[in-house]
Amino acid sequence: MATGEIEEKRTVELSGHVGFDSLPDQLVSKSVAQGFSFNILCVGETGIGKSTLMNTLFNTTFENEEASHYEQDVKLRPETYELQESNVNLKLTVVHTVGFGDQINKEESFKPIIDYIDKQFESYLEEELKIKRSLWNYHDSRIHVCLYFIAPNGRSLKSLDLVTMKKLDSKVNIIPVIAKADCISRHDLDKLKVKIMSELVSNGVQIYQFPTEDEAVAEINSSMNTLLPFAVVGSSEDVKVGNKMVKARQYPWGSVQVENEIHCDFVQLREMLLRVNMEDLREQTHTHHYELYRRCKLEEMGFKDKGPDSKPFSLQETYETKRKEFYIELQHNEESMRQMFVNKVKETEAELKEKEKELHERFEQLKRMHQDEKKNLEEKRRELEEEMNAFNRRKVAAETLMGQALQGCSQQPFKKDKDKKNFFSLPSACSLTSGRHLN
Ligand code: GTP
Ligand code: MG
């Protein structure tokens, strides 16, 4: 059959029981055997009552580490628990924000939350894209719902709340709750609820709407949509009311019962979150939020459903195109790396040449200095030699004279006064020459 042609279907009667009517049962028993996972993200200021509400919701005591108000930035603390109710196993992950709202500069407070949510989507996508994938036993850590805790002691939403919810709304199902609702009067609570909803609408923040398509839950869900944000009270204290023990918060003037619908919306939240819409929250996460993340991510990676001519683009084609693009990019990178290397070599060569030139000049200068020095020394040596020669000549002359004088004295013992004078003047001539020699 050609693509696009509508296949004609005929309805036929069965003459007896075949058995495929057990398919829903098969699905149920398979799912029950596999177990379920549900992941809740609690976003709210330190000490707003996140842990207490979780304990109250699941009627248990989870690990409860108090956060300090001195965190440098916002962190996320996930804890996973295995729960069982009847024969249904639930792998529950509760993720708390730590240090939310405690920094002076809160501009980036939403970022770690977004990063955490994206990281869980990324892990799922990686598993999906593996050649050998095992999604059936994969621990799905994607956040199915975000309970956003709003402080009861204000007249409207804080900017931190608005900005964070705006950033989160395309990534997760948000259910806003007014925490510690026992701290606010009925009148103020009603006003606050109206104000919060109008602020969310005017700022275009999309919160989770309980689905009304399914007739079985349409009525309850639409009435619950009007109750948002839920005003909740949490408590781990059991108080005796009448002859029953109930979860409540006790005050000198009375007690606030967590499960009393007149006191707060805790029961409605539990009904909506766990009993009526848990599967819808899981489904919305997969079909809406994860789908959006996956689409953006694959488009970012270059995958397309349709080519430029609007024809369907096969995975093979996408792969080939991406491979070509990658190859061109690689070549381009290689070429620029080569160019960079050549330039570097040239630069180094020039530097070396410059250094060589400097060295050569220095050598020439030293050589010249050495030659000058040598010339000077030669000159001095020559002068000294000349002086030595002159001295030797004078010395010889003096010795000759002295020899002659001595000879004369031995032949004539009585000499004239004139000769005597000459004889005694000789040593002074000698001492003069030796004096010059010493200089
Ligand atoms: P961190 O994890 O430290 O950020 O705190 P948290 O948000 O988990 O708050 P937690 O549940 O530890 O509660 C902090 C304090 O608020 C405790 O003293 C609780 O008893 C109290 N508290 C919790 N829920 C409520 C509530 O609904 N009403 C009132 N009045 N107090 C509450
Ligand atoms: Mg806590």
Image: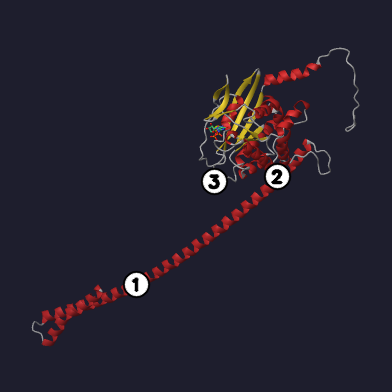
- Choose mark 3 or mark 1, whichever is in front: 3
Q: Is mark 3 within 8 Å of ligand 1?
A: no
For this orientation, the residue located farthest to the left is 414
Residue at horizontal 80 percent and vertical 38 percent from the top:
313
- The residue labelled by disc 3 is 104
Can see residue 132? no
Q: Is mark 2 within 8 Å of ligand 1?
A: no
Query: Where does the N terminus fall, quadrant-wise?
Result: top right
Query: Where does the C terminus fall, quadrant-wise?
Result: bottom left
Comparing 79 with 245, the one in front is 245
Residue at horizontal 25 percent and vertical 76 percent from the top:
436
- The residue labelled by disc 1 is 380
Q: Position of residue 422 (x, y in %)?
A: 16, 84
Residue 104 left/right relative to 322: left
Q: Earlier in the sequence, mark 2 or mark 1?
A: 2
Q: Position of residue 60 (x, y in %)?
A: 57, 24
Comparing 322 with 37, the one in front is 37
Quadrant containing ligand 1: top right
Residue at horizontal 74 percent and vertical 20 percent from the top:
27
Please tell me how crowded label 3 is: few (under 14), some (14-19), or many (20+) other residues with Cα within 10 Å.
few
Residue 105 left/right relative to 431: right
SS label for mark 1: helix
Residue 278 left/right relative to 252: right
Q: CA distance from mark 2 to mark 3?
A: 27 Å
- Choose mark 2 or mark 1, whichever is in front: 2
Q: Is mark 1 within 8 Å of ligand 1?
A: no
Amino acid type at mark 1: Lys
Residue at horizontal 57 percent and vertical 33 percent from the top:
49
Amino acid type at mark 2: Ser
Comparing 175 with 4, the one in front is 175
Q: Position of residue 348 (x, y in %)?
A: 57, 55
